[in-house]
Image: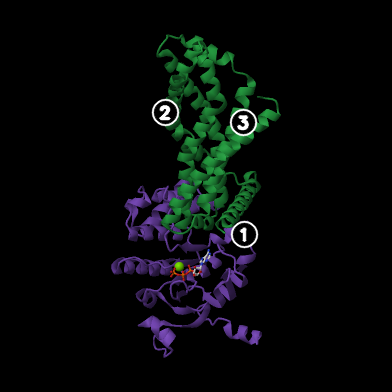
Amino acid sequence: MLRSQFWKNFLQETGEIARFTGRLFSQWFKPRYEIREFLRQCYIIGYKSLPLIALTTFIMGLVLTMQIRPFLVDYGVESQLPAMVGIAIIREIGPVITALIFAGKIGSSIGAELGSMKVTEQIDAMEVSGTNPFKYLVVTRVMAATFMLPLLVVLGDAVALYGTYLGVNMTGVTNFGFFWTKVFRNLSFGDVLPAFVKSFFFGFAVGIVGCYKGYYSKKGTEGVGQSANSAVVLSSVLIFIIDLIAVQVTDVLGLN
Amino acid sequence: MHIAGNIKKIPQTSGQGEAVMTVRNLYKSFGAHRVLIDFSLAINSGENVVVLGKSGSGKSVLIKCIIGLLKPDSGTIEVLGESIPELSDEALDEIRMKIGFLFQSNALYDSMTVRGNLEFPLRRHSITATQEEVDELVKSALEDVKLEHTIDMMPAELSGGMRKRIALARTLILKPAIILYDEPTTGLDPITSREIIELIKEVQQKYHSASLIISHDMNCVRMVADRVVMLIDGKNYKEGTYDELIQSSDPVIKAFFE
Ligand SMILES: Nc1ncnc2c1ncn2[C@@H]1O[C@H](COP(=O)(O)OP(=O)(O)OP(=O)(O)O)[C@@H](O)[C@H]1O
Ligand SMILES: [Mg+2]
């Protein structure tokens, strides 16, 4: 009983999100282009997330290095520390952690913002003021999330690697240049490109889920909280699902 | 039988000029829930019509159909000669420039200042205006509601009555020919309500606009209504002047005036 209800809701919601995505693409390339609002969203979604992403990825790089070191020391390959942590960060941990932090910060704020605009009739007010609210609010936010997350991932990776550098330096003294050579010598195109490409999908998922949850928010302030909350939960799960698909695809393409 | 019903429902006019808005035989349901059932109404130029009805009777649904935010299931809505449900998005934007809409919840944009809120309709409708003209319009709209000093404040910093007045200023900034008010005085204290009512009357005298006002505030009804329409059970149950209705012996109508 309960289980069939769950699947019914699940399928229904999947269908609705698919329809929402279809509507998004049908409007994406059509004028009028809301360039100003898009740039404003890039500033809010991208630039304003910088400190948080930098802080979390820095700590992650540092901690990861400290955790892995004893293991490598046991095997007498401590010199491989930068290469090993580097590859873990660039291929997997950097993009996923950045995307999850992004989902927590941006997914919830988009969900809450659009949700409260919905329940206080601001979305209707835009519509009667000569504005297509779907273009003005949804398309701009999804675009900004899609294009800003990959940039944040690149930055997050760099900061995480700097954390790694400090971590490596805690015992021995490594030359800064030497450290970077070590990291990059082991990296190939096949490590960097798939990670970069999948972050576009992560960003898109966070944007579309946040907008969907907000845009169809239930009436009342409770509905707004629910939108924000379920936006974070659903987009975080989607990030892992996309990650799983991405690793299969890169495997098939022979990039692994 | 149906035809006879329709003829009877064709709204009466009070002879103040030609109709600027007519609604005929409007039906709207949400799933199995029937909200508007064969509702009709007409408004003439320069006239203030109040729609009176219980909470949940479909008053907001009615004016959302009129402005094109909701699509009726059937029936006609003509505003300034255009049939609203049949318009394309562009044509709808065009006609909406001539219709002001005051939302029940004000619907001020939280993320913008008062200035941003007032500029929004000016900038978004396809109007070519210079920065000076926009500034001038914003200033005069704020003067109309006597809140010039709030221009750089955020909506969250304003009181409920001030927010209502700013929303009113935003509604009026394009000098609409028809204004739709959704419960303009609900949730305000009697003194502020009175101020809002005075403002509505001032605006009407200044711009000679026609208005449709939704209200259950009897003071408001008495002060502004040229004609009152009773929305009961989804229909235009009865219409007439305030004085006519208050003398009615029908218990359903009496209940509103006690
Ligand atoms: N989008 C919607 N979806 C489903 N039902 C709706 C929707 N909008 C309104 N309704 C229903 O239509 C009925 C009329 O709602 P409406 O908001 O028009 O009432 P109202 O007369 O404006 O009441 P109030 O005086 O409380 O504002 C309500 O029962 C409401 O539940
Ligand atoms: Mg209402």
Above or below, A256 relative to B180: above
Tell me the CA gap for discs 3 and 2. 23 Å
Q: Residue at x 42, y 9 (%)?
A: A172
Front position among marks 2 and 1: 2
Same chain check for tags 3 and 2:
yes
Which of the chains bears the disc numbered 3?
A: A
The front one of B109 and A44 is: A44
- Label 2 sits on a secondary structure element that is helix
Q: Which residue is mark 3?
A: A197
Residue B24 rendering spot, x and y as whole percentages: 59, 76
Mark 1, residues whose alpha carbon is within 10 Å: few (<14), some, or many (≥20)? few
Q: Amino acid at mark 1?
A: Ala
The label shown at residue B158 is: none
- Asked whether disc 2 touches disc 1, contact meaning CB atoms under 8 Å apart, the reply is no
Residue B180 rendering spot, x and y as whole percentages: 48, 67
The chain assigned the colour purple in the figure is B
Indicate the quadrant containing the N terminus of chain A: top left, top right, bottom left or bottom right. bottom right
